[in-house]
Amino acid sequence: MNSTEEPVHERITEAELAVMDVLWQRPRRTAAEVCEEVCAARGWSPATVKTLLSRLVQKGAIAAEPDGRRYLYSPLIERAAYVGGESRRLVDRLFGGSAASLVAHLAETEALTEDDLAEIEALLKELRP
């Protein structure tokens, strides 16, 4: 798996993302193991998890490897690549492609804490030569 792989063409829903998060933490999990991680917290049944896994396989986001009478599921896209693509789409769609406009909006709406601002400043210092 690498960041040069073909991106997922269909959007991943919030529910599917919860399943992806489990698989990003530890690949090669069964549907039952994924359910152990998300079903109770989200009020899902094992059938719901199986449906979400099936959709993710169809979207090309995960692979299903036969293992006896069950399948082992693993992500085909890296978390960093997914987050990067989604972040870029957000900035493009809502802020005309300007990441600075996003940060300015967050600052203006008081969505950034002092800690957030300090982290951003530190990151900018690291990025500048």
Image (tube, rainbow, N blue to C red):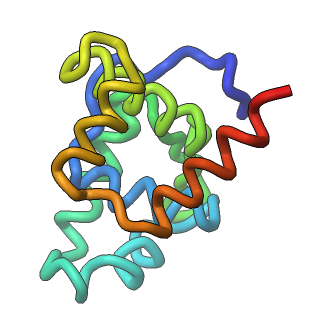
Location of residue 56 with respect to 91 vertically, above or below: below
Task: In the displayed orientation, state which residue is furthest to the top.
Answer: 96
Quadrant including the N terminus: top right
User: Left or right: where does residue 93 sit relative to residue 77?
Assistant: left
Residue 7 shows in this picture: yes
Depth check, front residue: 126 or 85? 126
- Residue that appears at 44% across and 28% down: 60
Q: Position of residue 87 (x, y in %)?
A: 40, 32
Depth check, front residue: 93 or 105? 105
Location of residue 16 with respect to 46 vertically, above or below: above
Location of residue 94 with respect to 55 vertically, above or below: above
Q: Quadrant of residue 104?
A: top left
- Residue that appears at 56% across and 45% down: 79
- Residue that appears at 31% across and 45% down: 54
Quadrant including the C terminus: top right
Q: Position of residue 75 (x, y in %)?
A: 56, 45
Depth check, front residue: 20 or 93? 93
Q: Position of residue 98 (x, y in %)?
A: 37, 17
- Residue that appears at 40% across and 37% down: 57
Q: Quadrant of residue 34?
A: bottom left
